[in-house]
Amino acid sequence: MPPEVSPSPPPSHRYQRRGFSCDRAIKYFFASNAGLTAYFAEINGRCARELKRSREASAVFNSFSDQTSATRDLIVNNKDTGLDPNAEMLATLHKNHAIQKQKALASLPATPHLTAAEREQLIESIRTRDATATEDPLLVTTLAQEWRSCAPSSTRSRPQAPTCPPSSRT
């Protein structure tokens, strides 16, 4: 008679094979996300005021830029083509940009977290902005820097993701 061969016992779960458990991987995934979610909730809680102010100032400037960017791009692209700066085409583009600028300034979004003086300062800096300027208005960059200074700048204060428990080979 041939020797009896006993089959290996089936794994305890259909997705568990040779020490790897999808259950452990899923728990690891959710534990990692929970740690990061708590981390960002803590930062956003500590810096909520700065974050809202920075977002509102950026939203005002982005709204203005969205409404005037098409003509502004034409002005910037045609500025260095060697055309006379007083050429009829550039004059028409500047005139259209001024009209679009007035329309854009009339329909800016609300800013409940900015003071009235800050809002007026931002609007005035946008109103006096040259069509070929590339930098953001001073108030937008100042508020962004305030928010960055409030949030931790290095990853040393970030929570470490939990390590996956060692698998036991069966």
Image (tube, rainbow, N blue to C red):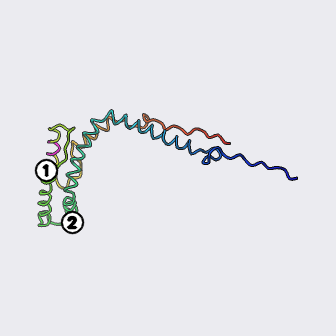
Secondary structure mainly formed by the magenta segment:
helix
Q: Which residue is mark 1?
A: 106
Horizontal arrangement in the rendering, residue 46 relative to residue 14 (left or right): left
Other residues around mark 2 within 10 Å, as few (<14) / some (14–19) / many (≥20): few
Is 19 in front, or is 98? 19
Q: Is residue 121 magenta?
A: yes
Residue 92 spot, x, y in % from top left: 12, 64
Q: Amino acid at mark 1?
A: Ala
Quadrant location of the C terminus? Answer: top right
Is 81 in front, or is 128? 128
Q: Which corner quadrant of the image does residue 57 belong to?
A: top left
What residue is rendered at 22% in x and 55% in y? 66
Viewer-nearest of discs 2 and 1: 1
Which of the numbered marks, if any, corresponds to residue 81? 2
Q: Residue furthest right?
A: 1
Element type where label 2 sits in the image: loop
Residue 89 spot, x, y in % from top left: 14, 66
Q: Which residues are magenta?
A: 120-124
Element type where label 1 sits in the image: helix
Q: Is residue 92 magenta?
A: no
Residue 153 spot, x, y in % from top left: 37, 37
Q: Earlier in the sequence, mark 2 or mark 1?
A: 2
Which of the numbered marks, if any, corresponds to residue 19? none
Q: Is residue 144 above or below residue 68?
A: above
Q: Which corner quadrant of the image does residue 25 belong to?
A: top right
Q: Which corner quadrant of the image does residue 114 belong to?
A: top left
What residue is rendered at 19% in x and 66% in y? 82
Q: Is residue 29 above or below residue 77?
A: above
Q: CA distance from mark 2 to mark 1?
A: 33 Å
What residue is rendered at 21% in x and 65% in y? 81
Other residues around mark 1 within 10 Å, as few (<14) / some (14–19) / many (≥20): few
